[in-house]
Image: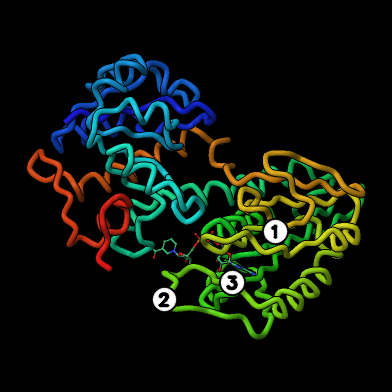
Amino acid sequence: MKLAVFKEEIDRRVAVVPSTIPKLKDLGLEILIEAGAGQEALYSDEEYQEQGAQVKSRSELLKEAEIAVSIHPLSEAEMKSLAKDTLVISQFQPFADAEITGKLKALGLRAFSLDMIPRTTLAQSMDVLSSMASIAGYKAILEAASLLPRYFPMMITAAGSIKPSKVLVLGAGVAGLQAIATARRLGAQVEAFDTRSAAKEEVLSLGAKFVEVEGAVEDKGAGGYGVQQSEEFIKRQRAEVQARAMKSDVIVTTAQVRGRKAPILVPKETVEKMKPGSVIVDLASSTGGNCELTEDLKVVQHNGVYILGNSSLASLMPQDASFLYSNNLLNFAKVWMKENQLNLDMENEIIASALITADKPA
Ligand code: NAD
C-alpha cells in the first residue's frame, strides 16, 4: 500500500522522519514523500531517499496515495482529488468541528483522527497529543524565560542577591506538568491548579505546590479529561488565581475542556493587577484562551504584561517534534497493518476510537 506524506503548509514539522521509513516498509507500506516535506524540520530529501522513500511532487502524491498522512488536514479541495476510499490520517479534531466527519464521509474517504486515540496505557506510544503537549509545556517556559526581564533562579552574586521567579501553572495535564518540570529545573518556585484530583500527586512529585479550590467537578467517564465547571466554581477559582497572579512573574495556562471553549481563568482585571514585565503564556489560545486578553498566535502587551497566545508551540521545535510524531504514527500503524494488509478491525478499541468515519454502534 502506498502511504503518502504531505508537506505541511503552515507548520515546520513533518509527519514522518527518515529513521521511521524502514520500519514502516517492514509493515508492508511503500512510502512516498512530498519534495521538501522535511526541510523545515532539517530532514533532507536525500535522507528520505537513502531510507527507501520515493520523493515526489504534491500532485503525484494526491494521485497515487492510498493512505494520505499529514499533521494538519489537507484542504477540502485536495481531499476531493484523492481516490475514493483513501485512508486519510491527520488531526481532524471532531470535538471542535462537528461537521468534519460528515464532510469526510461525503468525499468517500476513510479517516483516522490521531487526536481521537484513547489516552490509555496501551495507546500511550501512539499518543501525538501527549508528545506535542509535552514539547509545548517545555517551550512555554523557555519563551517566558526569554521575555521575562528577570532571572528564573535565585542568584547570590557579589553585586547583590536575586529572588527566584514565581511561576503559576493553570491546568496540570501533560503540557502543564512539563511546564512545571522545566520551570523547576530553571530554579523557579512553582504553584499549580487543576480540577482533577489525580493531578495533585503529580504536581507535588515535581516539587511544586498544588493549589486546591474546593468543589471541582470530576467525571470518571471523561477519559481522564477535565470537565466543565460551574460558574460559581470558576468565580472562586478566578479569585484564587488573582491572589497568586499578583505575586507571580510568569503564568502558563493550559486549562482545556474537550469540545468546549477554554475557561477564562485570568480576566483582564487580573492582568491589570500583575507586576509589569510579567509574562503569560496561554497554551489554550486556539480554543479561546484562558486569559481574556489572549490573541491566538500573537504576543500582546497590556499594562506592561506580555501575553503570548500559542497552542502550537511544538512546531517551534520541529526536529524533535517530528521525530516523536513519526514514532507515534509508526506505533499506530502497527495496530492496523497486519501481514502487509490494511486491517481495520473495529473490535480493536484504538481503531474504533480513531476511525471517525466508521459507523459507530448506536
Ligand atoms: P487537556 O489539554 O485536555 O487539559 C489540560 C488540563 O487542564 C487538564 O489536566 C484539565 O484537567 C485541566 N483543566 C480543565 N479545566 C480546568 C480549570 N477550570 N482549572 C484548572 N485546570 C483545568 O489535558 P491533557 O494534557 O490532554 O490530558 C488529559 C488527560 O489525559 C489527563 O488526565 C492526562 O493525565 C491523561 N493522559 C493519560 C495518558 C495515558 O494514560 N496514557 C496519556 C496522556 C494523557
Q: Is residue 189 above or below residue 107?
A: below
Q: CA distance from mark 1 to mark 2?
A: 24 Å
| Nearest to the observer: residue 359 or residue 45 | 359
Please indicate whether residue 22 sits to the left or right of residue 303 in the image.
Answer: left
Residue ranking furthest to the left: 339
**Given the image, on which type of amino acid does mark 2 rest?**
Gly
Label 3 sits on residue: 228
Q: Position of residue 199 (x, y in %)?
A: 54, 72
- Residue sitting at 35 percent across and 32 percent down? 16
Residue at 66%, 68% in the rendered image: 192
Secondary structure state at the residue bearing disc 3: loop
Pick the residue in front: 26 or 145. 26
Q: Amino acid at mark 3?
A: Gln
Q: How many marks?
A: 3
Which amino acid, by three-letter code, is at mark 1? Asn
Q: Is mark 1 within 8 Å of ligand 1?
A: no
The residue that mark 2 highlights is 221
CA separation in Å, label 3 and label 2? 13 Å
Q: Secondary structure at mark 2?
A: helix
Q: Which of labels 1 and 3 is toward the front?
A: 3
Residue sitting at 33 percent across and 64 percent down? Answer: 121
Looking at this rendering, what residue extends furthest in the front direction?
Answer: 106
Dot 1 falls on a residue whose secondary structure is loop
Whether pointer 1 and pointer 2 mark residues with C-beta atoms closer than 8 Å, the reply is no
Task: Name the residue beneath numbered marker 1.
Answer: 290
Q: Quadrant of residue 43?
A: top left
What residue is rendered at 46% in x and 28% in y?
8
N-terminal of the pair, mark 1 or mark 3, is 3
Q: Mark 2: few, some, or many residues within 10 Å (few <14, many ≥20)?
A: few
On the image, the x and y values in percent for residue 164 come to 79, 58
Beta carbon of the mark 3 residue lies under 8 A of ligand 1:
yes
